[in-house]
């Protein structure tokens, strides 16, 4: 009797449980369905409005409508609307050039620039041996016109696109420079240039100096060669200069950091859903043991900041200079069928000491250069940041 009652109760409980599960599943599914329908209807409303605007323009506008300009403006307007200040859209030709730069090859006049919020472009990198360097273009220059056309008359994203062009073609820029009155006109030639992203030399007191101008696919090999060169000529300390380095390919940091950091999770990424994944995990069995300082400034950004942060957190390097740019976001690039691409911020980067997004890395020794000067425009004796780093390193060098 008891067994039959227990079995009946059990069957009833199972039935009730199934019913509850069905109701919950149906409710959740209905909510998801309604949400998708609502989102779809909202998108259709936006598209319908765009079609109405397009029809009105094409039927009534006194001027000429450029489909290419409309497409670029629509795409860039959408990207601007999401609030990601680092997101960008690249046309097929611009994306090809971007890929080449990651491989250590520059196609263009030999400089990088970014939109500065005023409608103009600011030069962020000038590559050694390029037409830009040979014609005096400097980091921090503000580009106001390209080939005689003011940037203020261009659509969003159009100015960066106009910097691209076939190898051998000419590019005329009007620029503003701090401390110089009026516009400066420079005439450049677009070229293909293999970039040496690392250079080195031995300074006083056997301090090895390594400058990293960008992080591309060839940087880790060039850095390794620089270390060997300095080791062979007796370097007893290191001064690594990433000032005005706007970043590059994050994946090349691991082999560089393996020279300094033993096995460790050096950096992670936190995504929008709260999950975290490892970004850099070193796996070195042998590392250097040299007093090290890293030179940084407001132009040190992205991958260069990550390098500096890990060197301080994991190796004990001291940072000298000024507060860095403050870009600690993980970006992914999504390529489309026509060869164009979207670069989007997808996560925030953390090291042992936390994140520096929007705030920048604060140096251990804060030193300003003379107003209006940049690191590449001063010699060693006039470089207050470099001299301070040498001063900091000197007592740390082991005596024989």
Image (cartoon, helix red, strand yellow):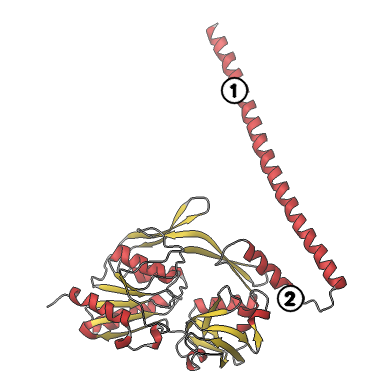
Asked if residue 284 shows in the view, the reply is no
Q: Are marks 1 and 2 in contact (CB under 8 Å)?
A: no
- Looking at the rendered image, the quarter that the C terminus falls into is bottom left
Decide which of tag 1 and tag 2 comes sooner along the chain. Answer: 1
Residue position for label 1: 14
Residue position for label 2: 68
* Local secondary structure at mark 1: helix
Q: Residue at x 78, y 63 (%)?
A: 50
The residue lying furthest to the top in this view is 1
Asked if residue 259 shows in the view, the reply is yes
- Looking at the rendered image, the quarter that the N terminus falls into is top right
- Residue 32: percent from the left, percent from the top? 66, 43
Separation of marks 1 and 2 at Cα, in angstroms: 63 Å
Residue 154's disc number? none
- Work out whether 249 lies above or below 162: above
Circle 1 residues within 10 Å: few <14, some 14–19, many ≥20: few
- Residue 323: percent from the left, percent from the top? 39, 70
Is residue 256 left or right of 325 when viewed as pictured? Answer: left
- Marker count (numbered): 2
- Work out whether 211 lies above or below 341: below
* Local secondary structure at mark 2: helix
Residue 61 occupies which quadrant of the picture? bottom right
Circle 2 residues within 10 Å: few <14, some 14–19, many ≥20: few
The residue lying furthest to the left in this view is 400
Q: Residue at x 36, y 88 (%)?
A: 378
Question: Given this view, does label 1 or label 2 mark the residue nearer the observer?
Answer: 2
Q: Which residue is at the front of the view, 127 or 354?
A: 354
Residue 221 occupies which quadrant of the picture? bottom left
């Amino acid at each position: 009797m008891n067994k039959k009652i227990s079995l009946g109760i059990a069957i009833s409980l199972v039935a009730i449980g199934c019913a509850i599960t069905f109701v919950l599943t149906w409710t959740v599914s209905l909510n998801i369905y309604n949400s998708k329908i609502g989102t779809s209807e909202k998108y259709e409303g936006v598209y319908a409005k765009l079609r109405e605007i397009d029809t009105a323009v094409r039927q009534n506008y006194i001027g000429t409508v450029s489909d290419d300009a409309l497409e670029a403006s629509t795409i860039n307007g959408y990207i601007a609307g999401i609030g990601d200040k680092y997101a960008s859209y690249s046309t097929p030709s611009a994306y090809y050039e971007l890929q080449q730069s990651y491989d250590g090859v520059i196609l263009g006049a030999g400089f990088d620039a970014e939109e500065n919020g005023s409608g103009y472009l600011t030069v962020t990198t000038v590559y050694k041996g390029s037409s830009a360097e040979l014609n005096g273009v400097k980091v921090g220059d503000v580009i106001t016109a390209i080939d005689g056309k003011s940037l203020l008359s261009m659509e969003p994203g159009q100015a960066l696109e106009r910097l691209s062009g076939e190898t051998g073609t000419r590019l005329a820029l009007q620029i503003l420079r701090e401390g110089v009155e009026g516009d400066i006109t420079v005439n450049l030639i677009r070229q293909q240039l293999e970039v040496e992203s690392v250079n080195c030399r031995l300074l006083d007191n056997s301090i090895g100096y390594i400058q990293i101008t960008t992080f591309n696919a060839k940087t880790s090999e060039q850095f390794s060669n620089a270390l060997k060169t300095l080791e062979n000529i007796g370097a007893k300390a290191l001064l690594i200069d990433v000032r005005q380095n706007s970043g590059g390919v994050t994946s090349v940091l691991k082999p560089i950091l393996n020279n300094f950091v033993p096995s460790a999770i050096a950096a992670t990424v936190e995504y929008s859903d709260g999950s975290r994944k490892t970004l850099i995990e070193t796996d070195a069995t042998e590392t250097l043991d040299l007093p090290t300082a890293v030179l940084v400034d407001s132009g040190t950004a992205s991958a260069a900041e990550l390098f500096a942060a890990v060197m301080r957190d994991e190796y004990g390097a001291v940072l000298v200079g000024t507060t860095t740019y403050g870009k600690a976001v993980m970006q992914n690039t999504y390529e489309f069928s026509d060869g164009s691409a979207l670069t989007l911020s997808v996560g925030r980067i953390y090291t042992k000491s936390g994140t520096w997004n929007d705030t920048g890395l604060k140096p251990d020794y804060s030193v300003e250069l003379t107003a209006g000067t940049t690191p590449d425009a001063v010699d060693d004796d006039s470089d207050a940041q470099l001299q301070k780093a040498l001063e900091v390193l000197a007592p740390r060098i082991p005596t024989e």
